[in-house]
Image: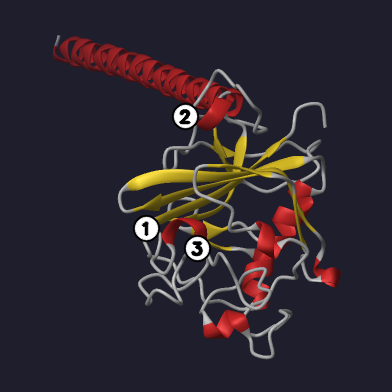
Amino acid sequence: MDQLSSMNQSLQQNIQQIATDINNSNMTCCSDHHDVLFETQANVTKSLQSIMTDSLTLKSCEKKRSITVLSNPSFPYPVVHPNKHSPFYFPYLCDTLTDGGGWIIIQRRSTGNVDFYRTWDEYKNGFGSLDDDFWLGNDEIHAISNSATYELRVNLKYKGKFSYAHYSSFAISDEKSNYVLSLGAYDGTAGDSLTYHQGRQFSTRDRDNDASPRNCAVMYTGAWWHGSCHESNLNGNWGADSSKGPSWLALTDSELTTFTEMKIRRVDNS
């Protein structure tokens, strides 16, 4: 009897162990399924987010777009990431708001956080941040403005009021010819302080291409299409005195602007 009782007890223990093993196996199986489902859901969500982000990211900057701020808003414009078929392939800001939109921002000064008293190579390649003040870069500006016919709009703020200057065409040449400025006819509310610079080469503190015996970019702490020397100097040193800061003489006379934004837009049917 004792032997039979011992065998019965051993059998019950074995059955209990088998039941425990089965239960643990089921739990592991369920846990594995849960992990697989969770990972699959995460991957699907990530893929959908990627698709949505890509579909809502501007690939070009066109006039009268119905969508305004989409991805990476910046002051308050979206950042455009051109596709491989674009004649130029670098990110830029698109003003989708002003006069029907479609404006590519090539210069902005609003905070004074970025030093504009820079070298030729820095103006060639661009500097600053699309989230703040910046110069897009002369090579980039050349690439855009020579891919079609573009117009220029300059927005200015002086004594708390906004004005603008518009030019029917705008382009700059390549670096070999020192980024010569080409402009069309003026209209606007700020007065014309850029036509004087028509046909001028670009000058910086370390590359003097102006018509003055002295370097105007050094004298007035601003790289620009100087002649002898300027009627506008929008890259002048922020916070400098009236002769060396950002100015537009037809509007500000001997005083300075507190906001500048240069933007170009492809002319329809070009």
Q: Residue at x 82, y 63 (%)?
A: 174
How far, Cα to Cα, is label 3 from label 2?
A: 34 Å
- Give the SS element for disc 3: helix
Eye-nearest disc, 1 or 3: 3
Q: Please indicate, yes or no, whether residue 190 appears anywhere in the rendered image.
A: yes
For marks 3 and 2 on the same chain, the one whose residue lies earlier in the sequence: 2
How far, Cα to Cα, is label 1 from label 3?
A: 14 Å
Q: In the rendered image, which residue does mark 3 sit on?
A: 249
- Give the SS element for disc 2: loop
* Residue 198 x/y as whole percent: 73, 61
Q: In the rendered image, which residue does mark 1 sit on?
A: 258
Q: Residue at x 51, y 44 (%)?
A: 164
Q: Residues within 10 Å of mark 3 (few under 14, many from 20)?
A: many
The way the protein has been coloured in the rendering is: secondary structure
For marks 1 and 3 on the same chain, the one whose residue lies earlier in the sequence: 3
* Residue 163 x/y as whole percent: 45, 44
Left/right of residue 61 with respect to residue 164 in the rendered view: right
For marks 1 and 2 on the same chain, the one whose residue lies earlier in the sequence: 2
Q: In the rendered image, which residue does mark 2 sit on?
A: 69
Circle 1: residue type: Thr
How far, Cα to Cα, is label 1 from label 2?
A: 25 Å
Work out which residue is located at the far bottom of the displayed protein and give it. 213
Q: Residue at x 52, y 79 (%)?
A: 220
Q: Nearer the viewer, residue 251 or 113?
A: 251
Q: Nearer the viewer, residue 254 or 51?
A: 254
